[in-house]
Amino acid sequence: MCSQVTGEVLEVAVGTGLNLSHYPAAARLTGIEFSPQMLALARSTAADQGREITLVEGDAQALDFPDAAFDSVVCTYGLCCIPDEQLAVTEMFRVLRPGGLLLLADHVAGSSLVVRAIQRVLEVVTVPQGGEHFRRRPLETAKAAGFQIENSERFTLGIVERVAARKPSNATEMDG
């Protein structure tokens, strides 16, 4: 996924920096992370790889960046832990330039009833303990925020979803 980005790139919930080696060399990276401990690990990962990245402690639900600041926004396995994922994706929309690319990957509600039931049981523990949701749908969240979906795919029993979407270039596209 990360190889698709161009220009100024924001990775939301950068975590320990596991994605850093997958970005094109020309990408100008900024990563935001809520956890100072994870951010410290991301700094170490970047240093080990010789990768330049601006790392910022912050909240995905209130991105401290100006409107239309980035060409691409990436969030992999982060929406599941953000309390209000719709607000976070709305913020991603705001900081993307018109025509900008959004790339999301996360575990989601499984495609079978049995898998969804197991996920629901797991969430009884994981949501109160760590805020970990297994049944969200990045595709639907991106659509609701106004993104135009270019590609989506589900795999691994339907519990992983990848989405590529664009911010419309102008208001007319959003209305259509």
Image (cartoon, rainbow, N blue to C red):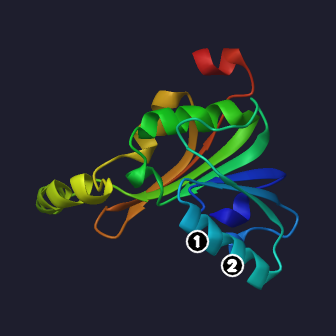
Most foreground residue, 172 or 71: 71
* Labelled disc at residue 40: none
What residue appears at the point 72 percent right and 66 percent down from the top-left corner?
Answer: 3
Report whether 111 appears left or right of 69. left
- Residue at image position (58%, 71%) is 16
Apparent side of residue 34 relative to residue 11 in the rendered image (left or right): left
Q: Which residue is mark 2?
A: 45
SS class, disc 2:
helix
Position of residue 69 relative to residue 38, above or below, is: above
Find residue 100 and report its horizontal and vertical position in percent.
73, 40
118 to 73, vertically: above or below: below
Place of residue 156 in the rendered image (x, y in percent of width and height, measured from the top left) = 34, 70
Three-letter amino acid code of the residue under disc 2: Thr
Mark 1: amino acid: Thr
- As helix, strand or loop, the secondary structure at mark 1 comes to loop
Report if residue 132 is visible in the image. Answer: no
Asked if the residue under mark 1 is in contact with the one under mark 2, i.e. CB atoms within 8 Å, the reply is: yes
Residue 102 image position (x, y, % from top left): 63, 46
Q: In which quadrant will I find the C terminus?
A: top right
Closest to the observer, 163 or 81: 81
